[in-house]
Image (cartoon, rainbow, N blue to C red):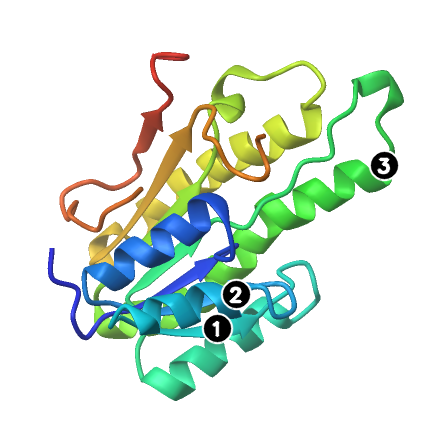
Amino acid sequence: MDLSGRVALVTGASRGIGRAIAEKLAMQGAFVVAAARGEHAKTVADEIVARGGKAEPASLDVTEAGAPEQFVAGALDRHGRIDILVNNAGITRDQLMLRMKREDWDAVIATNLTAAFALTQAVLKPMIKQRAGRIIAISSVVGQSGNAGQANYAASKAGVIGFSKAVALEVASRGITVNVVAPGMIETDMTRAMTDEASYITGHVLAVNGGMRT
């Protein structure tokens, strides 16, 4: 699919699934704004450019108050449009429920769910103005099935699904689709892609889990 002229924002783009998504979007011609904490996105952006793609790194802590909105505003100022948002940034803080600390609950919800809210809200205005946009969230099979020791993570990923379905209903008439990919166990740093070819799909959870859950 030719994404030339499109601008894609990818959070958690420095490694794992986010990095693979950023690279794939760039291969298809999109200008990728690869976001991660600190300077971690610079390597993936540099590698994309070295292969002839278009990308820039962005330093983004998705849990910092106002940072998601500033990130989106900066990208819009530089590029004039935002076509794709991939809400991928995520963390785990695993522990059995009886031992789980409140700060571990809060950190996971803030990173995996609240950040998706802030980023999605920020991109909606330019996407509505364009009457086009694609918003994709990375959930997990755990958000559908649950998993012992991951009450915080499962809640955040289930929340992403409900959130995305609700937003999909709100913006479907504006030419914007909102979908979720729910992977199973994918070999990444955290556990040790995705296409835009879906203009008639919205409010859907694509379960990519090798049959772990149907």
Among the 4 quarters of the image, the one containing residue 204: top left
Give amino acid for label 2. Ala
Q: Position of residue 131 (x, y in %)?
A: 21, 67
Rounded to the nearest angstrom, the CA distance separating label 2 from label 3 is 29 Å
Element class at badge 1: strand
Dot 2 falls on a residue whose secondary structure is loop
Amino acid at dot 3: Arg
What residue is at 20 percent from the left and 58 percent from the top? 175
User: With 77 as the anchor, is 194 left or right in this view?
Assistant: left
The span from disc 2 to disc 1 (Cα, nearest Å) is: 5 Å
Residue furthest bottom in the image: 77
- Under mark 1, the amino acid is Pro
Q: Quadrant of residue 182?
A: top left
Secondary structure under badge 3?
helix
Residue 167 higher or lower than 59, as above or below? above
How many neighbours does mark 3 have within 10 angstroms: few (below 14), some (14-19), or many (20 or more)? few
Residue 104, image quadrant: top right
Residue at image point 57% right, 40% down = 189
Residue at 25% x, 50% y is 172
Please report the residue visible at 55 percent of the width from the left and 60 percent of the height from the top. 118
Q: Are marks 2 and 1 in contact (CB under 8 Å)?
A: yes
Residue position for label 2: 41
Residue 102's disc is 3
Examine the rendering and report whether any part of residue 12 can be seen. yes
Spatial CA span between label 3 and label 1: 32 Å
Q: Earlier in the sequence, mark 3 or mark 1?
A: 1
Residue 133 visible in the snapshot: no
Residue 57, numbered circle: 1
Q: Nearer the viewer, residue 15 or 110?
A: 15
Q: Nearer the viewer, residue 46 or 163?
A: 46
